[in-house]
Amino acid sequence: MQEKWNLLCNVFILLQAEISLNK
């Protein structure tokens, strides 16, 4: 269960990083 949350957090961080780079 915790591993799934970790993966979700990583995806979210990556998404935010991509958005920041695009701006």
Image (cartoon, helix red, strand yellow):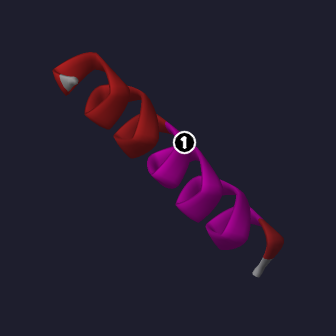
The answer to whether residue 18 is left or right of residue 3 is: right
Residue that protrudes farthest toward the top in the picture: 3
Q: Give the answer, above or below, for where 9 lies relative to 18.
A: above
Q: Main secondary structure of the magenta part?
A: helix
Label tally: 1
Q: Give the answer, above or below, for where 1 lies relative to 22.
A: above
Give percent across and percent down for residue 3. Answer: 28, 18
Q: At 63% across and 70% down in the image, what residue appears?
A: 20
Q: At 63% across and 56% down in the image, what residue appears?
A: 15
Given residues 13 and 21, the one toward you in this image is 13
**Residue 7, quarter of picture:** top left
The answer to whether residue 9 is left or right of residue 17 is: left
Q: At 36% across and 43% down in the image, what residue appears?
A: 9
Q: Give the answer, above or below, for where 15 lies relative to 2.
A: below
**Residue 16, quarter of picture:** bottom right
Q: At 54% across and 42% down in the image, what residue appears?
A: 11
Whether residue 15 appears in magenta in the rendering, the answer is yes
**Quadrant assignment for the N terminus:** top left
Q: The residue under label 1 is which amino acid type? A: Val
**Quadrant assignment for the C terminus:** bottom right
Residue that protrudes farthest toward the front in the picture: 1
Circle 1 crowding by C-alpha within 10 Å: few under 14, some 14–19, many from 20: few
Q: Give the answer, above or below, for where 11 lies relative to 1.
A: below
Q: Which residues are magenta?
A: 11-21
Name the residue carrying label 1. 11
Question: Considering the numbered disc 1 on the image, is that residue within a helix, a strand or a loop?
Answer: helix
Whether residue 12 appears in magenta in the rendering, the answer is yes
Residue that protrudes farthest toward the left in the picture: 2
The answer to whether residue 1 is left or right of residue 12 is: left
